[in-house]
Image: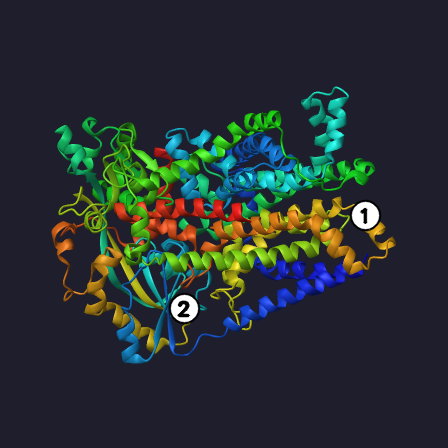
Amino acid sequence: MRWAQAIPLGALAVFFAFPVVTMLASFARPSDITSTLTNASLVRLWWFTAWQAALSTVLTVAVALPITWAVSRYSFRFSKTLIGLITVPFFMPAVVIATGVKAVLPSAPVPAILWAHVVFNVAVIVRIVGPRWAMLDTTLEDTAADLGATSLRTFRFIVLPHIAPALKNAAAVVFLFCFSSFGVIAILGGIKRRTIEAEIFTQAVNLGDTRTAVSLSVIQAVVILIVFTLGTRQSRVTNTSRTTDTTNDIATTLRIPTQRQRRRIVAAVALPVLIVVAPLVAVILRSLRLDGHFTLDGYRWLFNGTTEAVGINIASTLLTSTTFAITCAVLTTTAALMIASAKNNTSLISALTAFPLMVSAVTLGLGLIVTFDQAPFEWRVERWLIPVIHCVIALPLAVRTLDPAVRAIPESLTQASASLGAGPWKTWRRIELPLLTPALVRSAGLSAAISLGEFGATSFLTRSNSTTVPIAISQLLGHPGAQLSQAAFALAALCVLLFTAALRLA
Amino acid sequence: MKTPRIISTIAALTALSALAAACSSKATAPAPTEVVLVAYDAFTPEEGIFNDFTKDTGVTVKVVTAGDTGTMVSKAILTAGNPEGDVMWGIDNTFLSRAQEANVLTDYTPVDEGDICVNYDKNWFASRNIPVPTSFEDLAKPTYKNLLVVQDPTTSSPGLGFLLGTLAHFGEEKWRNYWTALTQNNVKVVSDWTSAYTVEFSGSSGKGKYPLVVSYGSSPPAEVLYSATPIDTPPTGVIEKTCFRQTEYVGVLRGTKNEAIAQKLVDFLLDTKFQESMPLTLFVFPVNPNAQLPKLFTDFAVRPKTPLTISPIEIEENRDTWIDSWRSLVLR
């Protein structure tokens, strides 16, 4: 049903387009835009922003593909843990990952930035490409292998064409994330390696120059739109080319690996996993070590009231974050399902949902403040606005996760079900829903993770008793005193462990 | 084919509207018996400190926060005349003029003060028998090469304070030369206080490589209060001659609907009880002369009698020029 998507799109218009357009109308001037384009120091920033994003994307894909292969081809004991581990960084506050990366790589800003971007974004590739790869019939690869094709050839000619649309989607998302990177850059980039997004924040907040900030964010949006349009056009070509093999697009059950295959899996994922996990391990070790000794004091200070002296109640922080995350997961997945189920055959809808990725969080955050300031829309100090904004930010990813899965359900299956006498509801429930479940779960997980880690637009919303985990960690690190920073690392380590455990159970 | 999606979307819609309803029920207009205090994130007053205010006036105090001082001020300027609350806590002397130009506050008054000063790692200097530097000039000497970490004044409030300190000390003529010398002495510049103090500085939790860092005159008592193992004296000290005075202001936001009660809240924040609670919760000094300081502060916090300072108007008029020149000197 196509009309249903009007609801999430309407919500996007209200909570995203409206505030952003308000900002543009109030602050964008053509003369400012041209002057920001010719300023030499800004041109340097543009160049760094672009090349680090491109390189980060390539590296992320390289690290993510072996993991994606393992978890979408085989069912092994630690696959859930593996997915959990690589997803953890996605919701970790930048300061924690950055500190972890810094512990391993102390004085090399550019490699550190690239590494942190890889750590953050591997989950995006695995979670978007994984479901698509899992749907490729394994007999195709087996046949290719039987006919003498090497694994590389099989990947190039069988797997790659099949996963290409999802891979392009995912790579585009990673590029956009790295292009508009802020937290990682702020910590690892020092003062010379800065992105445009960081500059937008500096202009708007530190220098009070909203007009320059908005101009930069207009140009940033245009650049991202161009990249995105190129990406979509390519994937449309791929879409038509692969219509011939849709009959084989059935989710196959994951195989239990043989001894030999198990060794191949270990060999393939060992290095990528090490790359992603090393900073997390560094964080955990840091939380257990103080002045060169092993200690659990950080965890004690977290819960014995020490942190309340600086206004942080850990229990209520965890509760707040969890509530926001669950709300965001439900809202976002529902909205994404509405959009994906409409099977829009134009790129219009996916372009629309890409807008929240394109616009700088600073512009959105400030836009919300100036837009929702009058009754009956005086929402800017409302607690519920935070999960709703998380939802707007998570929606593009959720749609990208669901859309390939919805499209991959062959019409022949539902038609067969109907001709065998199943009602439409029954067909949806028994055929389509089970096929979509992995993608729905992934989409919900991603949305929850985005909600847990969002630190851009939310930090502009005025909060009362709604400290989230990233804010709590950065506040604990923002005071002198060993107890508080030890507690901050304990909180970060606790998140790593809890989130990994949660995914293991799910 | 079509019907199941109708059902799914209806189910989804129901869930969505239920959620929306649940949200909007919480979203009722603020009760008239509430006064809203807007503050920066690090505003963490003593638990229950506002109970007396509520007892006296029947009005509860709701504290809302968003980001650091810069974020708070930028937002306040965009919403000037239609504020998010009634009273604003914590605009400092580096932002005051900008807020005044935008007419954010109806009136304002100093509420606390502190100093941005270079801190040093006592143990580092003692164990190497190197004398602790005592002035800005010392920091540029070869003895102290590779030892100082500061923050970018563009993105960090203590970083800006330190830059303004050098401006106040050396004057418009000579401050650039001083920074050139600091740069040649390999001053390390990072983007924020947390990176500088908790990562690069050797005297605190990060055990970094730099024994000199730009922080606050009140950082040593915090090191004692939150020390991992109980200690009597802080592991860090303050170089008094580098201190730049930071004054924070409180004021009634223009456009408040509760001017009278807002003014009462300002009075409460300036009153002895609240002022005396500030040192150990906010690590700032009271401005009320009747407020007693805790022992930890009288023992270890530094508040110079004649701190460096620059007027808010002068800061606002020159800040962009100064920062631009600083960037071209230091980022070269």
The circle drawn on residue A29 is: none
Please say if B181 is above or below A18: above
Q: Is residue B59 above or below residue A59?
A: below
Callout 2 amino acid: Gly
Can you tell which quarter of the image residue A168 is in? top right
Q: Judge whether B148 appears above or below A298 on screen.
A: above
Residue hosting label 1: A413
Tell me residue A240's x, y (percent).
80, 38
Comparing A238 with A45, the one in front is: A238
Instruction: Quickly name the residue at label 2.
Output: B85
Q: Position of residue A77 (x, y in %)?
A: 56, 37
The chain to which mark 2 is attached is B
Relative to residue A260, is residue B126 drawn left or right? left
**Which of the 4 image quadrants contains residue B14?**
bottom right
Question: Is residue A404 at all visible to an observer of this figure?
Answer: yes
Say what secondary structure mark 2 lies in: loop
Q: CA distance from mark 2 to mark 1?
A: 58 Å
* Residue at screen point 30% across, 41% down: B198
Q: Residues within 10 Å of mark 1 (few under 14, many from 20)?
A: some
Outermost residue, front side: A259
Q: Which image quarter: residue A169?
A: top right
Chain of the residue where label 1 is placed in the rendered structure: A
